[in-house]
Amino acid sequence: MWLDVLQTLVLSLVLAFLIRTFVIESFQVSGYSMMPTLHNNDRVLVDKLLYQIEGPHTGEVIVFRSPVVKSEDWIKRVIGVPGDTVKIIAGHVYINGRRYREPFIQLNYKYNYGPVHVTAGHLFVLGDNRPNSYDSRYFGLLSESRVRGDAFFIWWPPQHMGGL
């Protein structure tokens, strides 16, 4: 009987480790750069497996290892993927010459940026709270090798629960 319990416990721990490492993981949002989409201390589920298969898409919210503070994970929205040219005019984002619709932006911070061409193996990322976001406008293109996965669901707190 004890052997069965021990085997079940070991199997459960191995499966939990494998799932957390390769499939899905929970991350806590720290800061205000993604408001109003995400709030400080929100907890999100991040899909690691599907991201490795499909790669990044414009509009996805991703978690990545910070290119500035190596020990931290950051969360931002993908705006430009390889081959795209991104330009910001009066706070409005243009991708390949077409205005990108951003209904998640509440504060339209009037500024100009670019154009910047997104090279192979890189992404251009922005926070949804543009006046309060340290993103590709400051640290440049993000290497895709730094991406941990695609944030797809807010699970905590309950009043913020839902898909991204």
Image (cartoon, rainbow, N blue to C red):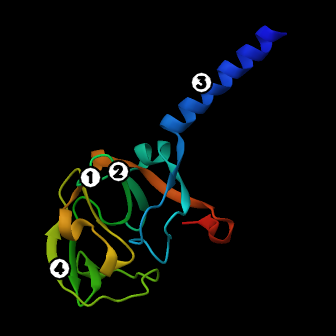
Res. 56 visible in picture:
no
Q: Earlier in the sequence, mark 4 or mark 1?
A: 1
Circle 2 is placed at which residue position?
72
Residue at mark 4 to residue at mark 3: CA–CA distance:
47 Å
Q: Earlier in the sequence, mark 3 or mark 1?
A: 3
Question: Closer to the observer: label 4 or label 1?
Answer: 1
Q: Looking at the image, do the residues carrying marks 1 and 2 touch, with CB atoms under 8 Å apart?
A: yes
Q: Looking at the image, do the residues carrying marks 4 and 3 touch, with CB atoms under 8 Å apart?
A: no
Circle 3 is placed at which residue position?
14
Say whether residue 143 is left or right of residue 101. left
Res. 142 visible in picture:
yes
Circle 1 is placed at which residue position?
69
What's the residue at 21%, 61% (across, down)?
A: 83
Question: Closer to the observer: label 4 or label 3?
Answer: 3
Say whether residue 122 is left or right of residue 103. left
Q: Earlier in the sequence, mark 2 or mark 3?
A: 3
What's the residue at 67%, 26% (across, down)?
A: 12
Q: Amino acid at mark 1?
A: Val
Say whether residue 76 is left or right of residue 157. left
Which quadrant does the C terminus fall into? bottom right
